[in-house]
Image (spheres, helix red, strand yellow):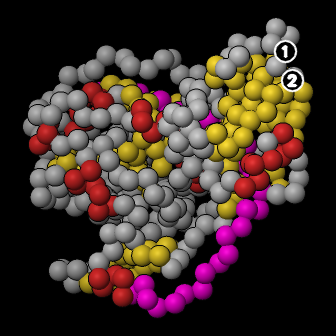
Amino acid sequence: MIRTTTTRYAALALLTALALEPAAIAQDAQSTPDAPSMPGPLLAPPSAATAATEVGPSVRLTGVRQWHAKDAPVLVRVETDGLVEEVTLMLLDANGQLIGQSPVRASTIDLRQVIPAMLEIERASYLQGAVRGESIGAPLVVEPLRTPRRVRTRDRTDESGTVRTDVIGWDADPLPNATREEREAMSTPRPVEPQITAGFRLYPEEDLLLSTDRGDLRMAFAHDEAPATGHNLRQLAREGFYDGLTFHRIASVDRLGNPFVVQGGDPAGTGDGTPGYAITLEESSLPFDYGVVGMARADDPHSIGCQFFISLGREGTARLDGKYSPFAYCVEGEPTIRALESCVIEDPATQRPVVPPRILSATLAPAPPRAVGTARATQRVTRQSPGDSAGHR
């Protein structure tokens, strides 16, 4: 499992920053003994996050406000420098499928009126500006404020006699990889809250630029899968929380020899640290695979805070699906991931590296444009060196 060793968490609620608590991913891993060379810079210089989204040099899309009640206008300001007469607004899902589009001129528009289909979305979608058929600038995320489903758990006593809490499903649905015993436990009916859309939230799509002393990483957020988890991490990054922290755990392989995870973001540097609060586990169907980023937690599912981990391969992390919240994926920096997993390990029991890789900075930058028919997830990194970590990808 990916869990933190902390057993007590503060019950703080953050509306704009939903945090996921540190968790230890798997408890058994061994390291690759090589010290990595530092890859060259991969990322463009980070830029400060702004309240608006630039759509090319002459068009600017801005959410007039961030939060919108269900029956209130969803106002978007479209600004140009006068050289562009018409902008096409396209609402796309995560796979690049067109939900709706409309040509507009520079003005403040009600998105509900311009693209009525936005009222029916159940997952975050992306409002993209285009000029003469070309997508320009970072999109605005249009996130429906949906009632989350409730996690289902059961207590299990492990071989050491310790009682563990297992996540076995959501509402009435067992996890796809649930065991027979877990499916039987799910057969007991529980109240199910109706899922409604209470409103919408608009914000610019941004990527996380993680600069480390082993190289750089660029992470794209899966707003359509785990938006609350992403909000939490972006808020921590904006406030400089991760600057100077380390990757304290290098679990390059699990007990079966499958590629596992690298874990960081703990202010204590031990696996016990938190940001002083915890947020709830968020349902996400994003599969754990190479380069996918999830939030660590303790045994309590709702103990997510600040620690995150990067999957090193599907073989070792598929068992985490549904039990942890994958919320992002690396789109640049595959050599850096290999450099991190190659650190020399000081203690195989804790998987602590002799020299923990250091996070120099964590900043946000505008995401690239989205286009019809193209899913951002196809840009996720894949392992380029089959010889590392048993050649898994």
- Residue 73: image location, x then y, percent: 88, 47
Q: Residue furthest top?
A: 83
Q: Are marks 2 and 1 in contact (CB under 8 Å)?
A: yes
For marks 2 and 1, give the CA distance: 6 Å
**Which of 166 and 175 lies nearest the eye of the viewer?**
175
For mark 2, what is the residue?
Answer: 105
**54 in magenta:** no
The quadrant of the rendering that contains the C terminus is top left
Q: Amino acid at mark 2?
A: Arg
Badge 1: residue crowd in 10 Å (few <14, some 14–19, many ≥20):
few
Residue 350 seen: yes
Q: Which residues are magenta?
A: 185-214
Q: Dot 2 lies on which element?
A: loop
Query: Helix, strand, or loop for circle 1?
Result: loop
Q: The N terminus appears in which quarter of the rendering?
A: bottom left
Is residue 189 covered in magenta? yes
Residue 11 falls in image quadrant: bottom right
Q: Please tell me which residue is depicted at 43% across the width and 89% down the height of the picture.
A: 187
User: Is residue 15 in sight in this rendering?
Assistant: no
Residue at the disc numbered 1: 85
Residue at 67%, 62% in the rendered image: 146
